[in-house]
Image: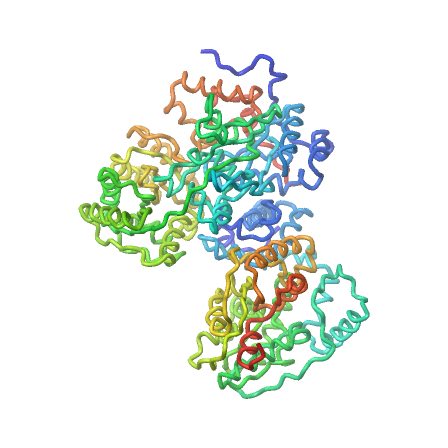
Amino acid sequence: MDLRLDPDDLNSCVQCGLCLPHCPTFRVTGEESKSPRGRIALMRAVQDEDAPITTEVVDAFATCVQCRGCEPACPSGVPYGHLMEQTRETLADAGVLTPKWQRLAFKPLASPTMLNVGSKALAIAQRARLVPKRLGISATVPLRQPSLDASGQDVHLFTGCIMDAWQRDIHLAVKRVVEAGGIGVMPTGDTAPCCGALHTHAGLTGESRRLADRMIDALDDGKPILVDSAGCGAAMKDYGHLLGTPEAEAFASRVYDIAEWLAGSDEDLPTAKPLDIRVAIQDPCHLRHVQRVHQATRTVLRPYVRELVELDDDGLCCGAGGAYSVLQPELAGQIRDRKLDVITATKPDVVVSANPGCSMYLSPELDRHGIETIHPMQLIDRALNGLG
Amino acid sequence: MVLNRVVEGAKRLVSPDRPTTSGDPLLDQLRGALTADRVHLDGVQRSLLSHDASVFEGGVAGPVCYPTSVDEVVAIMKIADEHGRAVVPRGAGTGLAGGAIPLGAPIVVAMTKMNRILDLDIDNRIVWVQPGVINLDLTRYLRPLGYHFAPDPSSQQVCTIGGNVANNSGGPHCLAYGVTNAHVVAIEAVVPSGDVLALGGLDAEPLGFDLRGIFVGSEGTLGIATKVAVTITKNPPSVRTLLLSFDSVRDAANTVSGVIAAGVVPAAMEVMDAKITAAVEHYVGAGYPLDAEAVLLAEVDGSEAGIDIDADRIADVGREHNATEVRFAKSEDERALLWKGRKTAFGAIAQIAPDYYLHDTVVPRSKLADVLEEVYAIAERHDLLVMNVFHAGDGNLHPLLIFDGREPGVLARVHAAGDEIISASLAAGGVLSGEHGIGVEKQKFMDDMFSHADLDHQNRLRRAFDPTCRANPGKVLPMGHSCADIQALRRVPSGVWG
């Protein structure tokens, strides 16, 4: 079957295997079929040798978290993320991957009205203890959301879909931090409802393209677009590749992770008394391995806390992976257990993660160890506003 | 000379391995001994575990087993014995000589799930590990204690201790610290009969024959290690890393033998030529000079008081051999980046062409410059691109022939050039392999290296552990001295993907 993969991209893998330990699914299984090298070999077998798409082949592709931890580890520069996205797109088009129920479940992401109604229903159901644990929704959805209004016209703050519905308090903290530097913020709200990252991961790239087009149209004023979700930021920075147009390239060059933008900004944030806490930094994969701007989190956060500690796992994934923890709960759980061991070994008071998916997935477990999970900007907000 | 092909008392000759079908009792027995989800016969597992990091094609993995204990390995060996099947052990699959590829359709035993660090005895500086522990994970585990595991192959971030034992692996820092053999004190191994052997011991001076030493480097042809005791090494108090640039590879090579001749034994001495340096620099951005024909990366370690003297001597020797620049790494970050560049060199090749064939011969240090010049000439004669990156201190050459396998006829040229490189190294008084092992790659050269009597005795030794020739058959010893029966069936018919 033609997976529609670029033969040169596919051939750039020399099977050296240096990616293996940087792959969370290889780490927890020790199986080649759950490693980047193995998955690339399968892509070749399917595309070049017409190997049949067996259950095992589909499983090898479906179990990839798409964390892209293998990419910085690869000396040959294999564009693994794009290979896997294309593979999934082709297989989803062929009806092999991403069943109908999953496509339906993604619908509300692009529709703020559906998402709000759904979230409210979920919040009520959670409080009535009607939501089974096996659904894998580890966050508690809020019943009511505070309002998020524009304070100026200097920068956009991309608010997104689930994050805006479930974690608007993070957007509010980010907005206050940016405003503290004298910058006026425009939350994007319903004008650009979703970045399409989850769709791309699931192979629904057509829908991602529609969402990207919509966003580029909506935010066409040339102003910087700040993103406080690492997964969304990575997807938006990739619009040039996704759409292949100069407009999309130009748009992508205006996208910044919030810490990246603050670290590169000429305006310094106000100083504040550092919070008396030990903070472990959990780099979201799409911040560290895809955007590769994770150092900025440290630069920006360092003045506001007593102590920053690194996790000794080379930025291995936490298992959240967008919808991965819901779709592959068993593997995700094993990956998370590794992460929890690494985090607890550093004995932090607080863990920061700049991606809503990671923090929602980790926080219920870390709560049990008495460790708070929070967005790095929320800590800066606390320090600036004397809330420590 | 009578070849010891049939051992008296052996239950049966090994039949050529045949593809297993799903109703095969072998499969049921394996699944009963392990668990169903750790014994696979699907096309994905079988095909993927038929390759390692080398270019070699063999057969196709038969059933694939992932044991988690010594008892399970014993069970696999006994079941394999009952069915007359060969067994091929496998670590991370980073081997470059085809040592882990199946020939025929043997049972492949992947040791990656046996990856626990078992016991640390810090007073005696010994750690017991399972064979699937990743080399760098062991060092990472030891780091807070101020120790490390000294053998550091370039693939150390992924290769396993079991694989290191099988190949007697080296690495840049083995110049001063010695290769794997110097760091393994005891091995628990399961031989093809299913017996569990304790080889070596924790005593400083174990009595009797050094069977541990025979097992290290045996490439899976004696059995499967299930537990390894390794010594750990105290981290050096101070380190100096130098980068010397040269206008010719000859000057760099002569500097290396000059340094050793001057009585300095650095922790590591690595040379890269201009082409490989460019590929590496593009990946790591470590500040490698792009205008030098060769660079020498040298490192000395030890107490703060002494190392500057050694570092300066290396710099002086370099200057005597026309070094155009001598640079000291100014920070731990810079040092780490320089080493990252050196250790990912092979993978970085794909930026230039999709395939490479990496050689691994060792020549006397004094002959380095001559042999290198010959290597370049051989590649030119065969119209191939060659790059050189090597453990210069050991005289361990790693010429890389770079090509695009899609080009018609190129493989024949690559193999012809490779054969000439090996012959040139042997003619200079060298040996076949520094650290990658013989595998299937260099078998045919064993006859050039050893006499028939030598090889026959090696085979007898091997048969003492493996009388029916079922442990990774068809590897290391050349045909005529090994299990030729198995080699009759090199390829399994297509369709295993089904």
Q: Residue furthest bottom?
A: A152
Q: Pick the quarter of the image with the N terminus of chain B.
A: top left
Give the answer, above or below, for where A276 lies relative to A61.
below
Q: Relative to residue B152, is residue A206 depicted above or below? A: below
- Side of A113 relative to B10 (left or right): right
Q: In this view, which residue lies farthest toward the left?
A: B320
Quick one: B440 or B28, which is closer to the camera?
B28
Q: Position of residue B165 (x, y in %)?
A: 48, 35
Q: Is residue A315 left or right of residue B393?
A: right
- Point 72% across, 78% down: residue: A113
- Residue B411 position, x and y percent, is 43, 38
Q: Quadrant of the C terminus of chain B?
A: top right
Asked if B264 appears above or below B221 in the picture, the reply is: below
The x and y percentages for residue B297 are 31, 48
Vertical arrangement, residue B435 with respect to residue A143, above or below: above
Which sits in the foreground, B343 or A237?
Answer: B343
Visible in this render: residue A256? no
- Residue closest to the eye, B86 or B402: B86
Q: Position of residue A90 (x, y in %)?
A: 63, 57
